[in-house]
């Protein structure tokens, strides 16, 4: 058994009869940030869906702290320390900020603590606690989503395209927070399509193309390889 | 003034009941996405249960209310969610509607079995004989009670939805179900709770209503139409909107009752029934006032099993075969049975009318029998001599009325057409079919068609006429489906948004297809050539048509025919079994015909397991037989064995025929699945191959053993019953096998405790793991570098970090 907190071994998965992942192997060691990069449609989101339990793999295993969790419902995994912030905005647009935070308490942390962490880190959210989340700016919405990942104190955090549709400055700020979360010990798997910012905080990077992980390595090495991967080299 | 006040208070107290019912409906709809047509039926069951507990068993009022409203009803709702509704999550609107409508019909049938209609069951009012004076008007406490309860419900729901985590998570599910899961919330549990809550509210309204009116299963069940007319004011989503709607409807009905003289007439229509028609009028008004719905791009649903459109040649051959077969069977039938089969063929035409609407366009109508009625009445009025011109006129009238009914609802989306058609059916019954001037003494005789030398004046000719019509219209539909218009319909069903961006005019296409469907149903009425009672045009009569059409497999013409046969077979079977009863335990004997009265509902509910109906599954099964050698061998061997048994006289001729039919319809198409080798990925929910195989063998043997010839006198009827037996065996076989399309297969979730993740893992665990491995930052980087260099460029295996 390896010491990885999250590990995918030979995962195949797809939608209906179409296979999207053709044997994905990926390891997220403790207290480190792994960046999963790749062009649009490579299967990054699908990989995260498998990892968080939303999409059952057709074969292969998903190990959390060395235990095979294939078949465990996503809500149960979430309660046991795997926090996921999905693609798009990971918030409930018709609930207020505070109600959104209240949903985070399903993972077993009490509301006071969640609010403390969230408002402490993002004072802007405190000002808007009774505002409906759908009316927040894109950056604020992503902060709200990230606040959950922070507050529930997970062992593993899965992040999908945090930067989508946001201004570069905001992205930088968010990744600053990601780096802080990582320093405090959480293992993080970040999915991104455009890599510059995330490579700054990642310990390991992996490139995924057409449903397989093509290479894994140090961020700097991977960065050099990226353009060929994106241009279909 | 006193009169005004009296009617205002009466109106407000029924408004309170509507508001309670509507809030239940809105709660389940918004939180589970399923519009519960059985909401009224839930209330009805609760009211009867309350009568049973309180009056029949003599349990005092308060414990009886607690038992029914707070325990039985919520449990019932939760069980319904768990057992039925969870299966149709993510299914198409049509399936969702048909399943809840089926539940409604099944509950109605069940209630009529448990509490036969021949007895009157008064439910005593709460606080009997207590009154207060309000501005000089005597008001009973029970009226006030309704108002108080409505206030409590409003306040309670508000608290629940804004102050409790549970209530907030019920709203969160609506926003994003998966995200709630990723938060650790359990949408399944939330849905069960919301159904329990909805059922509880239905029970409150049902019991309150029953104390004010006489207890009638049908009335209470159809109260759902009033309820949703009220809820539509809040777009089915807003509770304050629903309360406002309730006040409007309650007051309007009360004033109409108080101030409009029932003898007043408008043309041939007496206004005595106006109060009953008000919900429909209100619904249509509100729909007209609503701004056009924004198209929402919903996530891609389950892909449907593709229905293969037959080629025109196949359709022509099928049509000819159908006409010949019905002509042949008809010739064998005794007169009494001929009437029944002719009726069945008439129903098939009506189910056929749903093929373009539901099968091709993905819309649904719950008022097909109303169009049959309009066609029938128009024909009776204009075509006493059976002239084809009158038929054409009747059909045209139906098409126009269909377009008018559909227009306001179709501007909005999916569910509203179903609501509008059901309201239209109630409206027609109140203002049209139940009018003495229009259908005197409650029955209408449709004159037989007379086409030159041919007059459909005998049942046999009528049957042949219907068969020819079915074949012709079926061919027309296949032709349409293959045309550009047909492709547009399918595109619209698959993605309204994509169509709109391509500039297709959705509304005119939808109205066109609805008018076509109404016209076909109208033709079914105008050419029925028989006597109808006004009852047969009512909403409760329309529901089974739609249900069974969908059960038959609405994408295909053949499916429509199966649906029509099922529909026709139920009255046939209930006449055959009129005297039989099935004993359950020693003291309950349920007459078979009562069971049959709720079978259509049960069949519809079973749809939750395979949303595309029976016909496509059987067809797919046949295509698979050719590819599976064991299935081919067993099929041929079985058929030969049956034939040998018949030749040597071991089984009777009729037994052989029946068994062969069961074998061909049920066993053969399922064999490839039953005999396929177990696949490793089946482990989550393996098909019950053995059980299904045994069931098929049993069904075939039972078909052999039934003394067909001795028990059933008429040849034709025997054939019909055999077909039904075969179709039912197939359905049960599919159910036993439990194989559902890939998308439906739900693995049973594992408990994390079982796999060893037996407590929440926090950041601290990660830190601890790092420490145990004794890796410092530097070691770690070296490790990664080593790995990267060793696998440079090539596809790599997992990055394993050694201890
Ligand atoms: N819900 C879905 N149904 C069917 N196919 C899907 C679905 N989601 C994604 N896909 C397909 O899977 C492939 C990988 O998608 P995804 O994992 O979202 O890629 P990425 O996140 O890397 O852009 C794409 O080809 C996409 O079309
Ligand atoms: Mg993605």
Image (spheres, grey):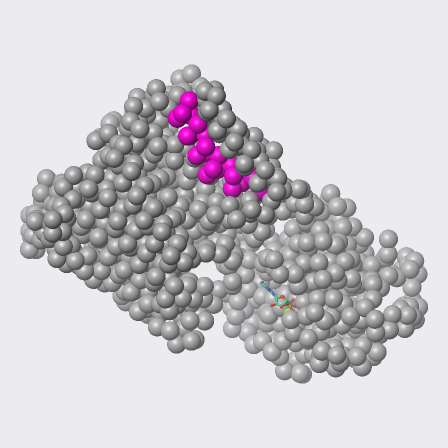
Which residue is depicted at the point 64% across and 57% down? A55
Dominant SS of magenta comes to helix
**Magenta residues (range):** B652-672
**Which residue is drawn at the image coordinates 34% and 54% (left, top)?**
B316
Q: Quadrant of residue A9?
A: bottom right
Q: Quadrant of ligand 1?
A: bottom right
Quarter residue B360 falls in: bottom left
| Image x and y of residue B208, in percent | 31, 40
Residue at the image position 24 percent from the left and 39 percent from the top: B342
Q: Residue furthest front?
A: B647
Classify B751 as above or below B361.
Answer: above
| Horizontal side, residue B63 vs residue B209: left or right | right
Residue A93: % across, % down: 53, 67
Give the camera-side residue of B653 and B682: B653
Q: Position of residue B141 (x, y in %)?
A: 27, 40
Quadrant that contains the C terminus of chain B? bottom right
């Amino acid at each position: 058994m390896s010491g990885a907190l999250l590990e995918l071994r030979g995962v195949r998965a797809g939608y209906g009869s179409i296979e999207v992942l053709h044997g994905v192997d990926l390891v997220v060691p403790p207290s480190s940030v792994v960046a999963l990069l790749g062009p649009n449609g490579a299967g990054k989101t699908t990989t995260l869906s498998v990892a968080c339990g939303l999409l059952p793999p057709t074969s292969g295993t998903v190990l959390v702290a060395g235990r095979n969790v294939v078949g465990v419902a996503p809500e149960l995994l979430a309660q046991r320390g795997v926090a996921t912030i999905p693609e798009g905005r990971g918030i409930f647009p018709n609930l207020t900020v505070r109600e959104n935070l209240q949903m985070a308490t399903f993972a077993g942390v009490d509301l006071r603590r969640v609010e403390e962490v969230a408002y402490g880190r993002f004072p802007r959210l405190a000002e808007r606690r009774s505002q409906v989340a759908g009316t927040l700016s894109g950056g604020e919405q992503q902060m709200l989503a990230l606040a959950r990942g922070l507050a529930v104190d997970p062992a593993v955090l899965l992040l999908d395209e945090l930067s989508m549709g946001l201004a570069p400055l905001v992205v930088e700020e968010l990744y600053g927070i990601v780096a802080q979360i990582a320093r405090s010990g959480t293992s993080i798997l970040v999915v991104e399509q455009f890599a510059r910012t995330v490579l700054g905080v990642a310990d390991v990077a992996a490139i995924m193309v057409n449903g397989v992980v093509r290479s894994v390595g140090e961020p700097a090495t991977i960065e050099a390889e990226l353009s060929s991967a994106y241009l279909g080299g | 003034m006193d009169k005004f006040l009296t009617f205002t208070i009466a109106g407000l107290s029924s408004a309170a009941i509507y508001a309670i019912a509507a809030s239940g409906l809105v709660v389940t709809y918004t939180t589970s996405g399923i519009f519960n047509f059985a909401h009224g039926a839930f209330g009805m069951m609760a009211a009867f249960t309350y009568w049973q507990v309180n009056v029949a068993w003599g349990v005092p009022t308060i414990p009886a209310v607690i038992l029914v409203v707070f325990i039985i009803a919520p449990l019932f709702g939760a069980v319904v969610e768990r057992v039925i509704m969870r299966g149709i999550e993510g299914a198409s609107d049509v399936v969702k509607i048909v399943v809840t409508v089926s539940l409604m019909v099944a509950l109605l049938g069940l209630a009529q079995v448990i509490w036969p209609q021949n007895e009157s069951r008064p439910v005593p009012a709460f606080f009997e004989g207590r009154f207060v004076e309000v501005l000089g008007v005597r008001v009973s406490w029970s009226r006030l009670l309704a108002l108080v309860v409505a206030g409590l419900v409003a306040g309670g729901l508000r608290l629940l939805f804004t102050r409790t985590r549970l209530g907030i998570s019920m709203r969160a599910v609506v926003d994003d179900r998966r995200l709630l899961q990723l938060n650790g919330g359990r949408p399944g549990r939330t849905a069960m709770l919301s159904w329990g809550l909805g059922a509880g509210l239905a029970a409150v309204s049902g019991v309150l209503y029953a104390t004010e009116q006489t207890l009638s299963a049908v009335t209470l069940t159809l109260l759902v139409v009033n309820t949703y007319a009220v809820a539509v004011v809040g777009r089915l989503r807003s509770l304050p909107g629903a309360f406002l709607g309730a006040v409007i409807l309650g007051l309007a009905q009360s004033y109409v009752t108080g101030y409009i003289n029932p003898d007043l007439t408008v043309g041939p229509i007496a206004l005595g029934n106006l109060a009953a028609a008000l919900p429909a009028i209100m619904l249509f008004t509100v729909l007209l006032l609503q701004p056009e719905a924004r198209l929402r791009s919903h996530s891609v649903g389950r892909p449907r099993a593709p229905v293969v459109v037959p080629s025109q040649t196949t359709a022509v051959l099928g049509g000819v075969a159908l006409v010949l077969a019905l002509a042949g069977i008809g010739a064998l039938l005794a007169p009494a049975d001929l009437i029944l089969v002719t009726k069945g063929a008439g129903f098939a035409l009506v189910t056929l009318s749903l093929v373009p609407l539901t099968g091709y366009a993905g819309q649904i109508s719950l008022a097909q029998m109303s169009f049959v009625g309009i066609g029938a009445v128009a024909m009776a009025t204009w075509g006493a001599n059976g002239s084809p011109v009158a038929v054409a006129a009747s059909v045209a009238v139906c098409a126009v009325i269909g377009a008018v009914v559909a227009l306001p609802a179709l501007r909005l989306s999916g569910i509203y057409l179903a609501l509008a058609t059901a309201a239209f059916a109630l409206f027609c019954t109140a203002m049209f079919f139940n009018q003495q001037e229009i259908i005197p003494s409650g029955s209408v005789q449709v004159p037989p068609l007379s086409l030159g030398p041919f007059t459909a004046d005998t049942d046999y000719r009528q049957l042949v006429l219907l068969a020819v019509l079915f074949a012709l219209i079926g061919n027309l539909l296949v032709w349409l489906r293959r045309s550009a218009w047909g492709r547009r319909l399918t595109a619209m069903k698959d993605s309204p948004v994509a169509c709109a961006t391509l500039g297709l005019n959705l509304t005119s296409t939808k109205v066109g297809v609805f008018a076509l469907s109404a016209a076909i149903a109208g033709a079914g009425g105008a050419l029925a050539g028989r006597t109808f009672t006004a009852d047969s045009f009512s909403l409760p009569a329309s529901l089974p048509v739609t249900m069974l059409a969908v059960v038959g497999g609405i994408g295909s013409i053949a499916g429509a025919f199966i649906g029509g046969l099922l529909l026709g077979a139920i009255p046939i079977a209930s006449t055959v079994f009129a005297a039989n009863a099935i004993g359950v335990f020693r003291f309950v004997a349920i007459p078979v015909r009562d069971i049959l009265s709720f079978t259509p509902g049960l069949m519809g509910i079973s749809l939750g397991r395979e949303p595309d109906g029976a016909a496509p599954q059987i067809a797919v099964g046949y295509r698979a037989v050719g590819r599976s050698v064991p299935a081919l061998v067993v099929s041929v061997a079985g058929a030969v064995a049956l034939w040998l048994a018949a030749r040597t006289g071991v089984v009777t001729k009729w037994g052989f025929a029946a068994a062969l039919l069961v074998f061909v319809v049920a066993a053969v198409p399922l064999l490839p699945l039953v005999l396929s080798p177990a696949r490793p990925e089946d482990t989550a929910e393996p098909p019950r191959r053995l059980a299904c195989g045994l069931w098929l063998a049993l069904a075939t043997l039972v078909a052999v053993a039934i003394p067909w010839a001795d028990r059933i006198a008429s040849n034709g009827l025997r054939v019909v019953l055999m077909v039904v037996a075969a179709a039912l065996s197939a359905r049960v076989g599919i159910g036993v096998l439990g194989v559902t399309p890939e998308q439906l297969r739900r693995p049973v979730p594992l408990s994390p405790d079982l796999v060893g993740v037996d407590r929440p893992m926090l950041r601290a665990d990660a830190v601890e793991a790092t420490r145990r491995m004794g890796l410092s930052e530097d070691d770690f980087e070296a490790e990664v570098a080593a790995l990267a260099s060793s696998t440079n460029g090539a596809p790599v295996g997992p990055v394993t970090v050694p201890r």
